[in-house]
Image: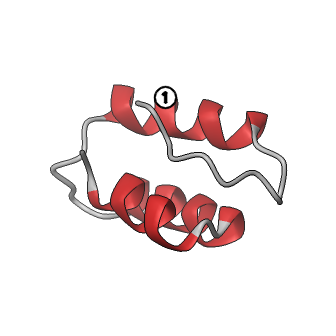
């Protein structure tokens, strides 16, 4: 599980997770692009009050 998933599952902060995905794309990252796309898709499906952990 990547740091974005871990942090989202801990804080449940959609906006912060979206910003982290954007930042990961700008930086030289060990998070593969295909994983970032999966995380991004899961975040798009989320409602602000959803508390379930990401499953990517």
Q: Which residue is disc 1 drawn over? A: 38
User: Horizontal placement of 27 versus 14: left or right?
Assistant: left
**Looking at the image, residue 43 lies above or below residue 51:** above
**Image quadrant for the C terminus?**
top left
Q: Pick whichever, 11 or 38, lies toward us.
A: 11
Q: Residue at x 26, y 51 (%)?
A: 2
**Image quadrant for the N terminus?**
top left
Q: Residue at x 76, y 42 (%)?
A: 46
**Looking at the image, residue 2 lies above or below residue 39:** below
Tell me if mark 1 has few (under 14), some (14-19) or many (20+) residues whose alpha carbon lies within 10 angstroms of its own. some
Disc count in the image? Answer: 1
**Looking at the image, residue 8 lies above or below residue 40:** below
Helix, strand or loop under label 1? helix
Q: Position of residue 51 (x, y in %)?
A: 66, 54
Q: Pick whichever, 53 or 4, lies toward us.
A: 53
Q: Position of residue 5 (x, y in %)?
A: 40, 52
Instruction: State the residue lying farthest toward the front.
Output: 51
Q: Pick whichever, 15 or 47, lies toward us.
A: 47
Q: Position of residue 16 (x, y in %)?
A: 60, 72
Q: Position of residue 37 (x, y in %)?
A: 49, 31
User: Horizontal placement of 1 versus 12: left or right?
Assistant: left
Instruction: State the residue lying farthest toward the left.
Output: 30
User: Horizontal placement of 48 versus 10: left or right?
Assistant: right
Q: Residue at x 49, y 55 (%)?
A: 21
Q: How is the rendered protein coloured?
A: secondary structure
């Amino acid at each position: 599980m990547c740091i974005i998933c871990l942090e989202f599952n801990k804080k449940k902060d959609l906006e912060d997770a979206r910003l982290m995905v954007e930042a990961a794309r700008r930086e030289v990252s060990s998070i593969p692009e295909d994983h970032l796309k999966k995380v991004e898709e899961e975040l798009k499906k989320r409602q602000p009050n959803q508390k379930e952990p990401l499953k990517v």
